[in-house]
Image: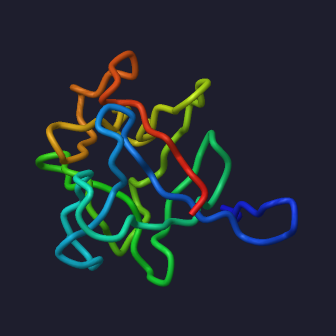
Amino acid sequence: MTENTNNNGGTNYVRFKNLLNGKFMSAPEGAKAGSWIYCNGVGTPLQFTQNGSDEDCVFKLNGSDLYLSFKNSSGAVKLHPSSEEASFTLKRYACACSIFNIHFKQFMWLKGEEPYVTGAGNPENTNALWVIEPA
């Protein structure tokens, strides 16, 4: 996969905000493998590089070898040292997008303050829509 770049040839860094609660993804307990991810306004928003196109991409945490992924058993979104099974498709709408895991064929959504990738994710619901902003 290729790293997305902006018009000036620089890398595009992004951060995710859930449309329902307006909070960015962060890892208040520290950005390390297995870290829980929250959208609660606590901590610095996580910044990622989108590698690949909107049809097939992974999100690598800036300054690390960690990827936006999730725990298989619970579906909780976490940081993982591998991009295996962490490929997503973005479907962009006017003000947000849905994030669909290609391998498991499920959408990312917010339950309370915690993002998940499970069968309960429905892109017609506001809790499954994400604003991807430049970081």
Q: Indicate the quadrant where residue 10 lies.
A: bottom right
Question: Which residue is at 62% across, 61% downward?
Answer: 51
Outermost residue on the bottom side: it is 63
Quadrant that contains the N terminus: bottom right
Q: Nearer the viewer, residue 96 or 122?
A: 96
- Residue at 38 percent across and 60 percent down: it is 68
Q: Quadrant of the C terminus?
A: bottom right
Judging from the image, the colouring scheme is rainbow
Spot occupied by residue 39 in the image (x, y as percentages of width and height): 26, 51
Residue at image position (12%, 47%) is: 74
Residue 86 lies, in percent from the top left, at 41, 54
| Residue in front for this viewpoint, 12 or 54 | 12
In the picture, measured across the screen, residue 40 lies left or right of residue 2, that is: left
Q: Is residue 114 above or below residue 104?
A: below
Camera-nearest residue between 98 and 112:
112
Q: Residue furthest right?
A: 8
Q: Residue at x 35, y 70 (%)?
A: 44
Q: Kindly give the residue lying farthest to the top in the view shown.
A: 124
Q: Between residue 39 and residue 98, name the one nearer to us.
A: 39
Q: Residue 113: percent from the left, percent from the top?
A: 18, 46
- Locate residue 118: give its quadrant: top left
State whether residue 129 is above or below residue 54.
Answer: above
Q: Position of residue 8 (x, y in %)?
A: 87, 67
Q: Is residue 71 left or right of residue 123?
A: left
Judge whether 32 appears above or below 103 on screen.
below
